[in-house]
Image (cartoon, grey):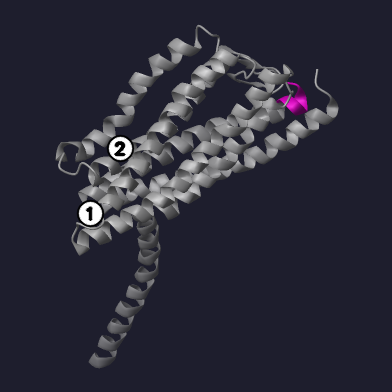
């Protein structure tokens, strides 16, 4: 049984986390709908369309995962207030699903990195630049990752009900389960993303002296985008650091802090909100979509005023 002060601290932590996850969900949902509208009603170049589609996958994943974080935070708050239990088979299922969606967030960033690798370094392989490939790629990855993840977690009883937090997730005291899940959904994708962007950066710097001016300008733009994306990769790295630190502290001390899970999830909630905004300023295609949307809203009233003035002049002329 946790103390009253610890329970109050947990309630405050869950309330703040709820605010961040709600913000991330709303912003990501709005941007995702704008992207779908833009793809459906506007003509987009093939290369830009692939980039925008990959961004839509990321935002859709953030919407789903943020919604699950909202559910977890609400259950924690209700549990703190009313001591209500949410232990059920659906709770266990949602815990496994949350880990899978968390892994898919990293896989979507990995897909984005692979696309940039092919477009910049292996541009002669045009077969890998088809839009349909990147549309179905997340589905293929879910089919592959799901059995791998479940085959690792289920035998280790990876997801259980956390009575102090009132939701189901991988308990950090189950060291084998946590480490296996971290390797599959966090460490492997993050290492691949970092390696790909380092390889792209090295390639651009090596090609700098033997390319035409137009290609140099394009590569300079790609390098700038990659630097911005590396900031996002840093946010992805931050997502897992607190949890790993707390796990190693538990291994060393053998003592489990009652708010261990909530403290680990707090930077996750913050990073989700940060990612939803940082992506918008890091990807030029996304930024242009939003700017064009604002321009359209501004131009439309002006056109109406101009047409009204012309019609008034015509009426005055006839009189």
Residue for point 47% across, 22% down: 183
- Left or right? Give the position of 273 relative to 59: right
The quarter of the picture where the C terminus appears is: bottom left
Judge whether residue 219 can be spotted in this image.
yes
Compared to residue 309, the image places residue 166 above or below, namely above
Q: What residue is drawn where x is 40% and y is 45%?
A: 32
- Element class at badge 1: loop
Q: Using the image as rendered, state which of residue 78 and residue 210 is in the foreground.
A: 210
Say what secondary structure mark 2 lies in: helix
Residue nearer the viewer, 300 or 248 = 248
Against 78, residue 213 (above or below) is below
- Mark 2 crowd level (few <14, some 14–19, many ≥20, 10 Å Cα): some
Between residue 45 and residue 282, name the one nearer to us.
282
Look at mark 2 in the image and give the residue it sits on: 114
Q: Residue 81: image x %, image y %?
A: 76, 28
Going from the N terminus, do you reach mark 1 or mark 2 first? 1
Residue 100 lies in the magenta-colored region: no
In terms of secondary structure, what is the magenta stretch mainly?
helix
Q: Residue furthest right?
A: 4
Question: Could you tell me which quadrant the N terminus lies in?
Answer: top right
Q: Is residue 218 left or right of residue 226?
A: left
Whole-number angstrom distance, CA of label 1 to CA of label 2: 24 Å
Query: Label 1 crowding class (10 Å Cα cut-off): few <14, some 14-19, many 20+?
Result: few
Q: Which residue matches tag 1?
A: 43
Left or right? Give the position of 185 relative to 252: left
In the image, which residues are magenta? Answer: 79-84
Can residue 112 be seen at all in this image of the molecule? no
């Amino acid at each position: 049984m946790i103390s009253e002060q610890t329970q109050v601290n947990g309630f405050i932590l869950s309330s703040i986390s709820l605010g961040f996850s709600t913000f991330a969900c709303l912003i990501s949902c709005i941007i995702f709908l704008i992207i779908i509208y833009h793809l459906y009603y506007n003509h987009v170049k093939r290369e830009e369309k692939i980039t925008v589609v990959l961004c839509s996958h990321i935002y859709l994943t953030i919407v789903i995962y943020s919604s699950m974080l909202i559910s977890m935070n609400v259950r924690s708050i209700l549990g703190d207030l009313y001591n209500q239990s949410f232990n059920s088979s659906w709770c266990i299922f949602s815990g496994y699903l949350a880990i899978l969606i968390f892994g898919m967030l990293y896989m979507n960033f990995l897909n984005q990195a692979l696309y940039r690798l092919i477009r910049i370094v292996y541009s002669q392989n045009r077969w890998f630049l088809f839009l349909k490939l990147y549309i179905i790629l997340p589905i293929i990855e879910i089919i592959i990752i799901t059995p791998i993840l479940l085959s690792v977690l289920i035998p280790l009883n990876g997801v259980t009900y956390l009575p102090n937090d009132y939701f189901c997730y991988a308990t950090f005291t189950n060291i084998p389960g946590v480490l296996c899940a971290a390797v599959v959904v966090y460490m492997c994708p993050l290492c691949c993303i970092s390696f790909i962007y380092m390889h792209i950066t090295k390639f651009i710097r090596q090609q700098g002296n033997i390319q035409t001016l137009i290609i140099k300008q394009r590569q300079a733009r790609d390098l700038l985008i990659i630097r911005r994306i590396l900031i996002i990769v840093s946010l992805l790295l931050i997502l897992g650091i607190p949890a790993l630190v707390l796990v190693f502290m538990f291994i060393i001390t053998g003592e489990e802090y009652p708010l261990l899970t909530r403290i680990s999830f707090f930077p996750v909630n913050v990073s989700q909100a940060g990612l939803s905004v940082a992506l918008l300023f890091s990807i030029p295609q996304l930024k242009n979509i939003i700017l064009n949307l604002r321009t359209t809203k501004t131009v439309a009233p002006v056109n109406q005023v101009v047409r009204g003035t012309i019609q008034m002049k015509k009426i005055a002329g006839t009189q």
